Amino acid sequence: MNTATVLQTSLSDLKLHRRGKVRDVYEVDDESLLIVATDRISAFDCILPTPIERKGEVLTALSEFWFERLKDVVANHLIESNVDAMPPAVQRHAQTLNGRAMLVRRAEVFPVECVVRGYLVGSGWKDYLRTGSVCGHKLPEGLPESAKLPAALFTPSTKAEEGHDENITEDQVRELIGVEQTALLRDTSLRLYTQAEEYARQRGIIIADTKFEFGLDKDGKLLLVDEVLTPDSSRFWPADEYQPGRSQPSFDKQFVRDYLETLDWDKKPPAPAIPSEIAAATTARYLEAYRLLTGKEL
């Protein structure tokens, strides 16, 4: 267990590949990258100045859990998550990296976020109220907020390193990556979501929606990449408290968003700090999601 919070890393001997909202990615060699999950948290596309203790650990451990559980659906990019088994240039930073680093295969990542929605919530709910559809998918009339959808929907979006991801149609994805690849990403995303949702429900968690990312390895093989089914990339609801017709309590960063909505903040940088009790309660939610899904304490 690594109790020190990490807002940003700077690893000598390794070249920074890119810095995302939460992850710092380094180049290890021609074949592999090092993904470091920090304790940064973003909301409304702004990185908050307050770290969430142990968040990077939860994201890494939960991604590793799901990569293993779902490997029969699609291969993934994870090579190793034990820092002691990584190259010497990585091992030198073990104190910082233990529990929050993944050595992964390089992949040519598709420029699409593969969002799957199983419930009517968030931007999908707003879309439905306005148009009766979610991202172009026509839905029955009169559905309440948080309703379970008749079938899970593939609702892709663009990938924005900065700023906001934009919802796009499946036709637009076909224009970006072609008909065959679009069908492959859609079908794989829906299979991943369906299997994960069924498993999580048995463990007391409803996965309301999630997003996947995919890439192709050097041989053109499809890989599931980045993080998978974490409280950062998904909406996790406690199944025993689920009640359609309202917003739901959650194990994800919606808790932080809800707090920020109470402030007089225009949702533009710089983001405000959050109180220590909100940060601690967020850590508790992330750890509880991990415990329920894996059956283990982190």
Image (spheres, rainbow, N blue to C red):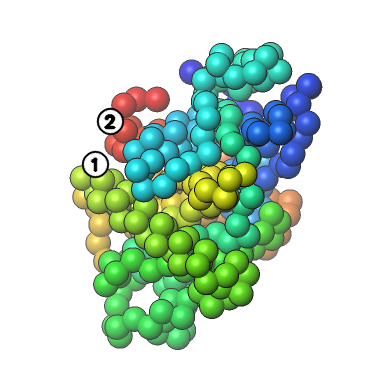
* Residue 159 coordinates in the image, percent (x, y): 63, 60
Q: What residue type is labelled 2?
A: Gly
Q: Marks 2 and 1: CB-CB under 8 Å? A: yes
Identify whether 29 is placed above or below 216: above
Residue placed under numbered mark 1 in the picture: 203
In the displayed structure image, the side of residue 64 where residue 172 appears, left or right? right
Residues packed near mark 1 inside 10 Å, few (<14), some (14 to 19) or many (20 plus): some
Does any portion of residue 196 appear in the rendered image?
Answer: yes
* Residue 265 coordinates in the image, percent (x, y): 65, 59
Q: Quadrant of the C terminus?
A: top left
Residue placed under numbered mark 2 in the picture: 295
Quadrant of residue 98 within the rendered picture: top right
For marks 2 and 1 on the same chain, the one whose residue lies earlier in the sequence: 1
Q: What residue type is labelled 1?
A: Arg
- Which structural element holds mark 1? loop
- Which structural element holds mark 2? loop
Name the residue at 39% across, 45% down: 251
Identify which residue, 106 or 267, lies in the foreground.
106
Identify whether 204 is placed above or below 242: above
In the displayed structure image, the side of residue 221 where residue 16 appears, left or right? right
Identify whether 44 is placed above or below 150: above
* Residue 62 coordinates in the image, percent (x, y): 42, 36
Does any portion of residue 166 appear in the rendered image?
Answer: no
Quadrant of residue 297 within the rendered picture: top left
* Residue 107 coordinates in the image, percent (x, y): 61, 45
Name the residue at 37% across, 60% down: 190
